[in-house]
């Protein structure tokens, strides 16, 4: 028996979200007294054996050409085959873009119940019960997986990364498959921290009064190595690109720190940011609803507060 | 060409979240039910836009739900669906729901299956992937653009920090999200027409659920916000370093 963790990569690099997924999977393995193994699909430039530090003792590396691009159908085939071979009772992945596509498919293939969007370790004292986010972070559900094999996808930044001093045994494998999806282009927003992967997000709303004022937010973001985001009206007015819009109808994020500047905190906006660990609000209106869900706040004018904050952070870093 | 759009009913975003029966049931008292936004604004409207360009396209709707789902089905028909199928069962487990949808799809042989990226109540984002696996079809999730040319679909999907363009020969299952289509509201003619459009009620096939919801919990009340004076911004920087460990 074992726990299998899907290690996700893009353009030859392991995604950060997978470090957390491995740490989480390794903790489950410890809890149920079995080893934790990784499954890595496609070629990477990173040191694979070194991933042992996240708690996986063995990594199945599938190197067929077809896995260099993501295709949920063929990825599922490889993960399920290896899970079966390794006698996996739990399959773990990150609840990121790839995980959301793969976890439900693997669940069907293995006839295994799935909990997507898990936020903590399962309770295995009586059955197998996983806590997950529901209602866009406004509540939790405890879901019992009633099948012999279980599939879990973990929300980013909800568990954390643990490391040990170890390296993994790497087993190179081939799993034949034919992709039906052809990737014809990748359009990346260059030079920025990807929003859904970011530890810190600096986000602006209509209080910023226009796209031309975003320089002070970008400076703050750069100082904190943060991604930038915005409220929906900001994207709708083309002050900022659409892919930055967070909320119920936009991107859902779960960073360690979300800094909301000139955003009122409408319920539809909060639906995208509720899962953030710490929330800082800068708004000139003390009655803005965002303060009700904030950990730290400044009631003040963003145009004065934000540059001062950036300077103060730079001062402390120096 | 036939498109299947999977629709579900969810509580409106502004609904109060409360639980009853010892926190084992969602308290539906006073809840306003809506068509799940991702299903409506993106999946269904994109299907309608495709049909407007090619009148030979037929749009079927499916929901797994009890009779109280009919208002959202009528709304989807009013927007522009042609035929609706209601599979008469409560939807508690993703596999159970996906299985029902896949059974219908096997019979009807759709070229395209659209779902929303997730329901706004359970946030599972599972049905699309499960249906695709049950039908042994390719699956493109989190799609933000969808074009079709003959039997080939060109689909932009969200990846970390950008988009990837996928080309795939039909049939395919697609989960839809923002930027797929422009939001619209039903007009009077659509609402009238919806009354006479076919709504088939189908009994579910027997299949076991793989999961059970044991209980719900509300998050602990957040500690009230720690306010820092705008004259002392440096203090916030210090807290971000010492308490939040942001740098
Ligand atoms: C179905 C539906 C879905 C929606 N989905 C989303 C979504 O996904 N994401 C989203 O964001 N919204 C969404 N909305 C819109 C949402 O309801 C709000 O209208 C929107 O979030 C408000 O954006 P805002 O906070 O930037 O603007 P406003 O509400 O106008 O707030 C601006 C804030 O800036 C403050 N301010 C002004 N000047 C300054 C200054 N100089 N310094 C500091 N603060 C200042 C003001 O006090 C105010 O609080 C949705 C709405 C609906 C109906
Ligand atoms: N009961 C249901 N009946 C039909 N389609 C559904 C149902 N539940 C979910 N879906 C579809 O599957 C998508 C993803 O839902 P979920 O996996 O539950 O988050 C939704 O946006 C719908 O398109």
Image: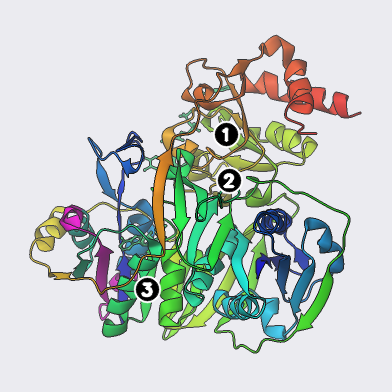
Closest to the observer: B196 or B137?
A: B137
Task: State left or right for residue A304 relative to residue B15.
Answer: right
Closest to the observer: A65 or B79?
A: A65
Task: State left or right for residue A136 relative to residue A280.
Answer: left
Tell me the quarter of the image containing the N terminus of chain A.
bottom right
Task: Name the subunit of mark 3.
Answer: B
Q: Residue B2, percent across and down?
A: 29, 79
Tell me if residue A222 can be seen.
yes
Tell me the quarter of the image containing the C terminus of chain A.
top right
Residue span colored magenta = B50-71
Res A49 label: none
Task: Name the subunit of mark 2.
Answer: A
Q: Secondary structure at mark 1?
A: loop
Closest to the observer: A129 or A302?
A: A129
Establish if A312 lies above or below A2: above
Task: Name the subunit of mark 1.
Answer: A
Q: Residue B140, percent across and down?
A: 50, 71
The answer for how far apart the CA atoms under marks 1 and 2 are is 23 Å
Identify the residue position indicated by label 3 in the image: B113
Tell me if residue A47 can be seen.
no
- Label 1: how many residues lie within 10 Å, few (<14), some (14-19) or many (20+)? some
Identify the residue position indicated by label 2 in the image: A253
């Amino acid at each position: 028996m074992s726990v299998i963790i899907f290690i996700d990569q893009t353009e030859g690099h392991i995604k950060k979200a997978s470090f957390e997924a491995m740490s989480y999977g390794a903790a489950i393995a410890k809890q149920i007294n079995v080893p934790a193994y990784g499954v890595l699909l496609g070629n990477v430039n990173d040191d694979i054996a070194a991933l042992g530090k996240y708690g996986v003792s063995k990594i199945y590396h599938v190197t067929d050409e077809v896995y260099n691009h993501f295709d949920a159908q063929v990825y599922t085939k490889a993960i399920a085959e290896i899970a079966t071979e390794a006698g996996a009772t739990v399959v773990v992945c990150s609840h990121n873009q790839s995980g959301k596509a793969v976890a439900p498919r693997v669940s069907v293939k293995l006839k295994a119940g799935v909990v997507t969007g898990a936020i903590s370790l399962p309770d295995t004292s009586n059955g197998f019960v996983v806590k997950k986010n529901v209602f866009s972070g406004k509540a939790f559900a405890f879901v019992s997986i009633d099948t012999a094999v279980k599939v879990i996808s973990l929300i980013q930044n909800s568990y954390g990364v643990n490391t040990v001093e170890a390296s993994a045994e790497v087993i190179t494998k081939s799993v034949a498959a034919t992709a039906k999806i052809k990737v014809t282009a990748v359009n990346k927003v260059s030079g920025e921290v990807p929003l859904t992967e970011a530890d810190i997000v600096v986000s602006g709303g209509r209080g910023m009064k226009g796209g031309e004022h975003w320089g002070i937010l970008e400076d703050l973001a750069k100082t904190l190595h943060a991604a930038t985001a915005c409220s929906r009206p900001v994207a709708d007015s083309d002050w900022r690109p659409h892919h930055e819009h967070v909320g119920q109808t936009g991107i859902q994020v779960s960073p360690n720190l979300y800094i909301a500047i000139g955003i009122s905190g409408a319920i539809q906006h909060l639906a995208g940011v509720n899962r953030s660990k710490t929330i800082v609000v800068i708004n000139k209106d003390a009655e803005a609803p965002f303060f009700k869900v904030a950990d730290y706040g400044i009631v003040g004018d963003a145009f004065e507060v934000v540059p001062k904050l950036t300077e103060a952070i730079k001062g402390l870093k120096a | 060409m036939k498109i299947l759009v999977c629709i579900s009913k969810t509580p409106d975003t502004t609904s109060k979240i409360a639980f009853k029966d010892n926190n084992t049931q969602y308290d539906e008292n006073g809840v306003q039910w809506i068509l799940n936004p991702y299903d409506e604004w993106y999946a269904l409207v994109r299907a309608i836009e495709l049909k407007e360009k090619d009148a030979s396209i037929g749009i079927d709707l499916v929901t797994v739900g009890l009779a109280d789902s009919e208002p959202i089905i009528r709304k989807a028909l009013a927007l522009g669906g042609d035929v609706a199928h209601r599979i008469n069962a409560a939807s508690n487990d993703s596999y159970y729901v996906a299985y029902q949808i896949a059974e219908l799809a096997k019979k009807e042989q759709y070229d395209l299956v659209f779902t929303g990226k997730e329901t706004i109540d359970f946030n599972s984002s599972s049905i699309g992937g499960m249906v695709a696996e049950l039908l042994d079809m390719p699956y493109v999730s989190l799609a933000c653009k969808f074009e079709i040319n003959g039997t080939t679909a060109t689909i932009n999907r969200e990846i970390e920090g950008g988009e990837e363009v996928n080309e795939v020969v039909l049939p395919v299952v697609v989960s839809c999200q923002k930027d797929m289509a422009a939001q619209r509201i039903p007009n009077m003619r659509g609402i009238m027409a919806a009354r006479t459009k076919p709504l088939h009620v189908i009994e579910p096939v027997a299949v076991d659920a793989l999961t059970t919801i044991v209980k719900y919990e509300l998050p602990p009340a957040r500690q009230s916000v720690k306010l820092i004076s705008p004259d002392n911004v440096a203090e916030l920087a210090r807290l971000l370093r010492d308490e939040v460990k942001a740098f």
